[in-house]
Image (spheres, coloured by chain):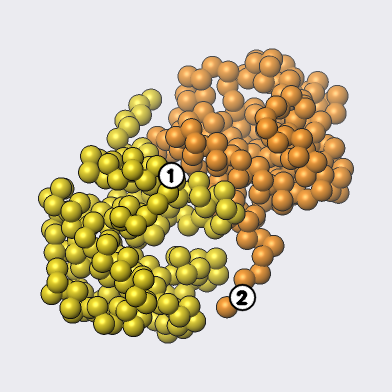
Chain colours: A orange, B yellow
Amino acid sequence: MYELIDKYKETLIKDIGKKRYEHCVRVMETAKKMAGAYGVNEQKALVAGLLHDCGRYIDEKLLLQKSKQYNILSSNSFENSKELLHANLGAYLAKHKYGIDDEDILNAIKYHTTGRENMSNLEKIIFLADYIEPNRVFEGVKEIRELCYEDLDIAMLKSLTNNILHIINNNRYLDIRTARARNYFLTKNIDLQY
Amino acid sequence: MYELIDKYKETLIKDIGKKRYEHCVRVMETAKKMAGAYGVNEQKALVAGLLHDCGRYIDEKLLLQKSKQYNILSSNSFENSKELLHANLGAYLAKHKYGIDDEDILNAIKYHTTGRENMSNLEKIIFLADYIEPNRVFEGVKEIRELCYEDLDIAMLKSLTNNILHIINNNRYLDIRTARARNYFLTKNIDLQY
């Protein structure tokens, strides 16, 4: 864990700032615990947790400039908010700047904000660790923290539901991957028959 | 208007029951008023309003059987709820049983439950007339009724927002067309620039 921090700390702080870097360390630690609980590769959880926000440039102009440079801007300008963009940019940087080749780690970074259908356990863990790391404070956080160690899918459903309600209530653009992910976790364990 | 009722009343009552038929008449009347307010063809609004629920068989087994027969069942069983299915079935029946050829009327029936991106004014009117017809009672209905005569797009945004909140809060499957439609009306009049 400390080796990993030594390796990436300086670059991360330079790009995303000290506060965001410290958040990444907390997500890394939370992800490691969850990985242990579910038999997921802990080293992958550490790397994905530490790098999940590596695309969240503290300089927002830089975030946009890099996204243009690497051709990851969407033609739909509402998909280019910093919330949605930094995850795609992060996956790109993790691969090309930090040298990560593992597809599961790259996907965990790419989908940590929106979620998606058919998420791997590592993807769920990074999404949830980001949501419940120790400094997060919101109504119901305690319940979701507990759920994260009981059932990943139910924790995902609950978190996505909260996210969607927050987005809709605040008149914000809803990424369709999030709507699909929530349907996926809602219906995953239900067997409807006609 | 009465000619239209004479033509379809008997079949509608047989298929969807008297109560649902009376709802259709109220939607038809509401749609006519809204069409007048926005310069939309009133005759089309009358036909689409009266027939919008023609696929909502009072016998749910029949709804499913007809949907199978006409190949409009989805491979995703959660899209085969009676709420989602009856609109697709309705558009099919409007064409093949009631002899309606007008694509705009057929689309207004098809998308009256979910909405969609790039809706025509007739589609918006049928969606909204269904939502606010005089017998509808829900918190905020008065505000939406007024909005329906002020700005169709804002009324659509408000109605879709309410629908999504209702669906999410009740742990129901969210049709992706509804999520896309809400994004569409949210972002339609905003010009983001980078």
- Badge 1: residue crowd in 10 Å (few <14, some 14–19, many ≥20): few
Residue picked out by circle 1: B139
Where is residue A106? Give x, y as percent: 66, 41
Where is residue B154? Give x, y as percent: 31, 40
- Above or below, comparing residue A105 to residue B102 in the picture: above
- Marked residue chain, label 2: A
Quadrant hosting residue A91: top right
- Above or below, comparing residue B121 to residue B93 in the picture: above
Q: CA distance from mark 1 to mark 2?
A: 34 Å
Which residue is nearer to you in this view: A159 or B11? B11
Q: Secondary structure at mark 1?
A: loop
- Marked residue chain, label 1: B
Where is residue B56? Give x, y as percent: 39, 73
Residue picked out by circle 2: A193
The residue at 62%/71% (across/down) is A192
Q: How many marks?
A: 2
Where is residue B180? Give x, y as percent: 42, 49
The residue at 47%/54% (across/down) is B176
Mark yes or no: residue A162 visible.
Answer: yes
Left or right, B58 with respect to B153, comes to: right
